[in-house]
Every structure is written in structure tokens, then in C-alpha cells.
Amino acid sequence: MHIHRYERWWMTFGLAMLVLFAGTIIFSAVADNLNPPSDMQAIDPAKVSSTPPFDHPGLHKLSDGSYELYYVAQVFSFAPNSVTVPAGSKVAIYVTSPDVVHGFEIAKTDVNMMVVPGWVNDATHTFKTPGTYLLVCNEYCGIGHQNMAAKNEVK
Ligand code: CUA
């Protein structure tokens, strides 16, 4: 089969770009030691409802005045559905899923996580401004995805 010279140059260019971009990703991952989060806590997705503290998801106040907030994200709700924290509270949020991949985004904050079955994801946020913060699933998870939301009241 005859391939025109320009066609061959273009294919070579395309292939070179693929190798360059893949190489950049691999190089940066190796050179900067960038890996998928490896300090994440694993959990048996079939046993979320019987694994502490996810057997009783919700808000826990720590002795230093900060909070831990445990969530279970599942089709198509978050548990707890509503929590109230005082303004200025530092909240360490932990979330896992017993079923499928969900999103975990608290509007007006930088909290935006993926919730993967088998893993506990976490983020810490200080809620400075009073108000109602909407927590939404931003990862399509099925027929009721658009109803998957909860709220955080900061007072
Ligand atoms: Cu859960 Cu979308």
C-alpha cells in the first residue's frame, strides 16, 4: 500500500506527540513521585454499614474543638443528610461508598472529592461563613443521581 509522503509525516508527527505526552506523564509521575493517593484508608464496601465509624455516620466533636464528619454516600443519598456546625469550625470530612462511584462536592468550598467503593476519601475544611452549604454528588451514579444531595448548616 502506498502512503503519501505528507500522510506519513503527519502520522509520524501524531505518533511522536502521543509518545511525548505519555512520556511527560510517566516522567512527571516518576520524577516527582506522583502516584494515586496511597495513604488512603481501605474499607470493605460490603461491610460499610457495620464498620465503625461508618456504621454511625455523622458529626463527632473532638476535644480540641474541631470536628470529624463521617459520611456514607450511596445511591441516591448522603448519610447524614443534614449537619449543623458552628461558624469557624474546622471539620475533617471522611466519606466512603458501599455501592458505586459518587462525587462529593460542597458548594462554595474547595471540598470536591471522588467517592470510590473500597476507599475512604477525606478533606478538611474550616467553615468560616455562616449559611447553608449544599453538598451534591457530582459524579453520575445512576437514575437518581440528580436527587443526591444533602446540606451543611453553618451557624
Ligand atoms: Cu451519587 Cu451521583
Image (cartoon, rainbow, N blue to C red):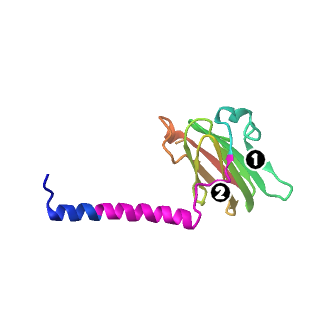
Residue 36 in the image: above or below residue 57: below
Residue indicated by mark 1 = 59
Is 130 on the left-hand or right-hand side of 11? right
- Distance, label 2 to label 1, CA atoms, is 18 Å
Q: Position of residue 106 (x, y in %)?
A: 60, 53
154 drawn magenta: no
Residue indicated by mark 2 = 131
| Amino acid under disc 1 | Leu
Assign the magenta stretch its main secondary structure: helix
- Which residue is nearer to you in this view: 137 or 17? 17
Is label 2 in a helix, a strand or a loop?
A: strand
Q: Residue at x 33, y 64 (%)?
A: 16
- Which residue is nearer to you in this view: 146 or 24? 24
Q: Nearer the viewer, mark 2 or mark 1?
A: 1
Is 78 on the left-hand or right-hand side of 86? left
Answer whether labels 2 and 1 touch (C-beta < 8 Å).
no
Q: Quadrant of the C terminus?
A: bottom right
Check the image and name the residue furthest to the front: 1
Q: Position of residue 44 (x, y in %)?
A: 67, 36
Is label 1 in a helix, a strand or a loop?
A: strand
Q: Which residues are magenta?
A: 14-41
**Residue 19 numbered tag:** none
- Which residue is nearer to you in this view: 135 or 118? 118
Residue 24 in the image: above or below residue 69: below
Q: Position of residue 115 (x, y in %)?
A: 59, 46
26 drawn magenta: yes
Q: Earlier in the sequence, mark 2 or mark 1?
A: 1
| Amino acid under disc 2 | Gly
Q: Residue at x 74, y 62 (%)?
A: 88
> Which quarter of the figure has residue 8?
bottom left
Q: Residues within 10 Å of mark 1 (few under 14, many from 20)?
A: some
